[in-house]
Image: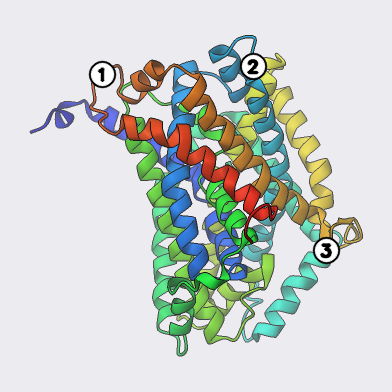
C-alpha cells in the first residue's frame, strides 16, 4: 500500500473537490460553444494540432505558474503580485486580469443567456421538424430580438452573483461533481449519434486530418487565445483558485489533470459537431451560432431527443455557471481585498456594472448592431480582444515573472511541497517558462502582425 492510501478519507474528497472546482472553471462554453466554431473557421485539423501544442507547451506551464503564485501568496491576483514583488509594477498584471475578467463576462454572459433560451425552447419542443435553415433563422431571429437576449443575460448574471454572494461554492461543488460527469456522458452519447450519421465521416476528417496549408497568422493567434481561454489562464482565475489549494496537493499533477480533462471535453464536443455539420450540410463557418444550430439538429435524430436536448442545455448552463463564478470571483476578490468593500457591495457593484455594459453585447445583433469597429460588433470585439490579446499577454508576463523574477527556490519549494515530492521536471519547467513559452507567445503575435512570414 503506498502512503497515499493511508491518508484520511476526507483529504481525497477535498482533493477531488479542488480538481472539480478548477475543472469546473476550465470546462464551460469555451469547450462546447467556442472551440467548435473557432476550429471550424480556422481549418479544423490543422487548428487542432496547433491548439494541442499550445496547451502542452504553454498552457500547462502557465497554469502551474498561476498555481505557484496563488498558493504562495494566498491572495487575489493583484494582491499576490504586490506581495511577491513589493514596490514593483508587477501588480499591473493582476490589474489587467481584473479588467480581463470584467470584459470576458460581458460576452460570456450573453452566450450563457442563449443557453437559457435554448432550455426554454427545448421545453416547448421548438426544434421539432425544423430544417437546418429554419434552425438558423430561429437562432438569428432570437439573437436579433431586443428584449429576450438581454433578459436572459441579466438572469444569468444574477444567478452568478447570487452564488458568489451566498458563498455557496461548497454546495455548487457538491452538485457539479454529479452534474459534470452527466454532461460528459451526454456528450459521448451525442458523439455516438453524430458518428453514425450518414456522411458524418467527412466531419471527422475535417477535425483530425490536418491541412497545414490552412495555417496562417490568424489561425495561430486564434489557437493560442482559445488555449488560454479554455484553460482559464492568463488573467489570474487560477491564481485565485491556487490560493485555495492546500499545501500538500501536487500542483503539477493538478494542472496536468485539469488541462487534459479540459482538452478531452473540447475534442469530444468537436466530434459531436463536425460529423453533424457535414451530414446536415450546415456551414462550418456559422460563427457564434454553430452549436445552437447543429445540436438541435442532432437531437432531432435521437430517440428521446426531447429529453436529451432539455437535459443537455441545462447541463451546459451549469457548466457555464461554474465558469462565470470563477471569473466574477476575480473581480469580487479584488474589490474586497484591495478596495476594502464588503463582499455584498462588491458583488452587486461588479454584477450591475458588468450587466450595464453587457447589455450592448447582448444586443450586438439587435439594436446595437450598428456599434461596430473594424466590422465587428461589441460582442465580437470583447470576445476577440480578451481571448486573443489580454489573456496571452497576461500569460506572457506570468511566465516571465516566474522565469526571470521570482526566485527559483520559491517556485521549486511550491512545486515540490517543500521537498516532499520529487520534481525531476523542474529544470525543464524552468527552461520552458524562461524561454520557450514567452518566445512562443511573442512569435505568435509577430506572426499575426505580419512582421515575419504570414
Ligand atoms: N475556461 C472557461 C470556459 O472554457 C472560460 C474562462 C476563461 C473561465 C477565463 C475563467 C477564466 O468556458
User: Label 1: few (<14), some or many (≥20) within 10 Å?
Assistant: few
- Say which element carries label 2: helix
- Residue that mark 3 sits on: 365
Residue visible at 68% across and 60% down in the picture: 114
Quadrant placement of the N terminus: top left
Residue 294 in picture, x, y percent from top left: 59, 75
- Say which element carries label 3: loop
Q: Nearer the viewer, residue 12 or 451?
A: 451
Q: CA distance from mark 1 to mark 3?
A: 55 Å
User: Label 2: few (<14), some or many (≥20) within 10 Å?
Assistant: some
Mark number displayed over residue 419: 1
Q: Is residue 153 above or below residue 84?
A: below
Q: Nearer the viewer, residue 274 or 326?
A: 274
| Quadrant assignment, res 152 | bottom right
Q: Earlier in the sequence, mark 1 or mark 3?
A: 3
Residue 391 can be seen in this image: yes
Report whether 155 appears left or right of 185.
right
| Quadrant assignment, res 373 | bottom right
Mark number displayed over residue 337: 2
Q: CA distance from mark 2 to mark 1?
A: 31 Å
Q: Report the number of numbered marks.
A: 3
Residue farthest to the top? 87
Q: Earlier in the sequence, mark 2 or mark 1?
A: 2
Amino acid at each position: 500500500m503506498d502512503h497515499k492510501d493511508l491518508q484520511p478519507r476526507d483529504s481525497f474528497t477535498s482533493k477531488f473537490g479542488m480538481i472539480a472546482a478548477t475543472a469546473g472553471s476550465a470546462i464551460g462554453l469555451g469547450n462546447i460553444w467556442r472551440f467548435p466554431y473557432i476550429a471550424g473557421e480556422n481549418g479544423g485539423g490543422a487548428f487542432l494540432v496547433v491548439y494541442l501544442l499550445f496547451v502542452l507547451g504553454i498552457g500547462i506551464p502557465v497554469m502551474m505558474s498561476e498555481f505557484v503564485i496563488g498558493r504562495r501568496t494566498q491572495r487575489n491576483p493583484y494582491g499576490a503580485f504586490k506581495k511577491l514583488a513589493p514596490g514593483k509594477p508587477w501588480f499591473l498584471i493582476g490589474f489587467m486580469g481584473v479588467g480581463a475578467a470584467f470584459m470576458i463576462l460581458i460576452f460570456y454572459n450573453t452566450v450563457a443567456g442563449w443557453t437559457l433560451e435554448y432550455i426554454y425552447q427545448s421545453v416547448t419542443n421548438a426544434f421539432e421538424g425544423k430544417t437546418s435553415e429554419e434552425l438558423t433563422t430561429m437562432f438569428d431571429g432570437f439573437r436579433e430580438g431586443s428584449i429576450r437576449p438581454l433578459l436572459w443575460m441579466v438572469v444569468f448574471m444574477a444567478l452568478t452573483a447570487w452564488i458568489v454572494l451566498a458563498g455557496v461554492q461548497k454546495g455548487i461543488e457538491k452538485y457539479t461533481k454529479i452534474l459534470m460527469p452527466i454532461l460528459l456522458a451526454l456528450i459521448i452519447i451525442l458523439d455516438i449519434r453524430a458518428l453514425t450519421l450518414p456522411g458524418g465521416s467527412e466531419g471527422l476528417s475535417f477535425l483530425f486530418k490536418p491541412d497545414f496549408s490552412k495555417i496562417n497568422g490568424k489561425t495561430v493567434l486564434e489557437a493560442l487565445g482559445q488555449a488560454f481561454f479554455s484553460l482559464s489562464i492568463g488573467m489570474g482565475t487560477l491564481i485565485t483558485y491556487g490560493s485555495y489549494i492546500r499545501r500538500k496537493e501536487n500542483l503539477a499533477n493538478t494542472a496536468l489533470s485539469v488541462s487534459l480533462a479540459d482538452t478531452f471535453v473540447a475534442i469530444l464536443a468537436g466530434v459531436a459537431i463536425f460529423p453533424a455539420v457535414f451530414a446536415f450540410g450546415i456551414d462550418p463557418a456559422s460563427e457564434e451560432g454553430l452549436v445552437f444550430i447543429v445540436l438541435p439538429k442532432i437531437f432531432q435524430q435521437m430517440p428521446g431527443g426531447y429529453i436529451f436536448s432539455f437535459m443537455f442545455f441545462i447541463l451546459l448552463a451549469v457548466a457555464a455557471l461554474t465558469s462565470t463564478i470563477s471569473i466574477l470571483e476575480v473581480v469580487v476578490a479584488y474589490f474586497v481585498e484591495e478596495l476594502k468593500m464588503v463582499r455584498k457591495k462588491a458583488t452587486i457593484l461588479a454584477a450591475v456594472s458588468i450587466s450595464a455594459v453587457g447589455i450592448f453585447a447582448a444586443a450586438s445583433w439587435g439594436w446595437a448592431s450598428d456599434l461596430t469597429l473594424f466590422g465587428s460588433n461589441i460582442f465580437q470585439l470583447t470576445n476577440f480582444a480578451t481571448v486573443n490579446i489580454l489573456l496571452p499577454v497576461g500569460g506572457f508576463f506570468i511566465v516571465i515573472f516566474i522565469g526571470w523574477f521570482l526566485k527559483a527556490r520559491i517556485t521549486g519549494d511550491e512545486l515540490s511541497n517543500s521537498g516532499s515530492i520529487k520534481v525531476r521536471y523542474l529544470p525543464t519547467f524552468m527552461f520552458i517558462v524562461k524561454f520557450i513559452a514567452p518566445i512562443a507567445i511573442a512569435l505568435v503575435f509577430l506572426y499575426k502582425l505580419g512582421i515575419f512570414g504570414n
